[in-house]
Image (cartoon, grey):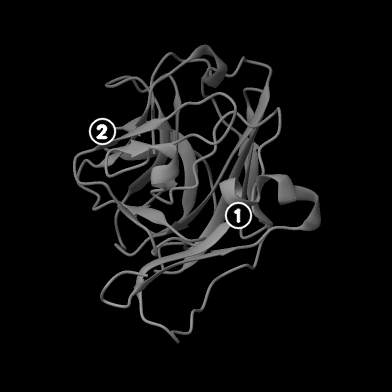
Amino acid sequence: ADGANTLETFIYGVNESSTTNFYKHALLLHNTSASPGTNFTYNWTSQIVIPDKNTVLLFHLDNNSNYGENRTHVYDFALARHNGSAVANAFPNVSGGYFAGGWEFDGTGDYLLIDNTGILDFDDNGNFTWAFWTRIRDTGKVHYMVSKDPAGVTTSGYIIGTNATGSVVMGKNNAGNINTQVGTVSNVSDRKWHHIAVAFNTETNVSIYIDGGLEASGNGAFDDNTNSNINV
């Protein structure tokens, strides 16, 4: 509490098997300006992610100063330490995420930049998955959610995003649009939170899950072994 009688409040939650990482990974709510007696509503509808040896990138996006996070720096809680840097107008919102904090992007050139290293260049026969929570409030537009594609090159890398109708798609850059290789039918550009997971099985098969259900799968011609940086 401070002299104005306001409270900084933290709520954590994990299952019994992960109590060792309680304060590092289990933040559910962070409020910096509550008065005594305030009631809080927080979300705990899915398990908190605790990284293992197969986790190569993990952002909690809580703007947690204990790990050096601020308006320009995002800490990677996986072992590889691929920290992110904010570009343009991207900014953290400590109470605006699905779990505790999140980052907001206005859709005009702002993103989190992750410098490429070899461990993020998945080999041609490897399996890997991108998974994240997202809420899209700006409907009717193309959104890049994860991209790893060389600038100006349409035959390399990959993009995970949504098209103008709100379908989740995986494809390549096509002059600001996404040349879709695999796409869903469901619309996630509805101002609601959705969990998106895109699983790459070797270099040709892709499966897209929305809120835990398989929505689409198919073959796509993409290159996951590119030296480009990652934009989120």
Label ID, residue 175 = 2
| Nearer to us in this view, 27 or 143 | 27
Q: Residue furthest front?
A: 3
Residue drawn 50% across and 26% down? 81
Q: How many marks?
A: 2
Q: Residue 9 location, x and y as percent?
A: 45, 68
Taking depth in this image into account, of 2 and 194 the one nearest to the observer is 2
Residue 119's disc number = none
- Indicate left or right for 3 with 211 as reference: left
Would residue 186 be seen by someone viewing this image from the given angle? no
As drawn, 125 above or below 141: above
Residue lying farthest to the right in this orientation: 17
x 39%, y 64%: residue: 95
Q: Residues within 10 Å of mark 1 (few under 14, many from 20)?
A: many
Q: Is residue 37 left or right of residue 124?
A: left
Q: Is residue 1 above or below residue 158?
A: below
Mark 1 and mark 2: span between their CA atoms? 40 Å
- Mark 2, other Cα within 10 Å: few <14 / some 14–19 / many ≥20: few
Q: Compare marks 1 and 2 and give the one earlier in the sequence.
A: 1
Residue indicated by mark 1: 26
The three-letter code of the residue at mark 2 reads Ala
Pinpoint residue 174: horizontal percent, then vertical percent.
32, 32
Q: Position of residue 165 (x, y in %)?
A: 39, 59
Front residue (pair 122, 92): 92
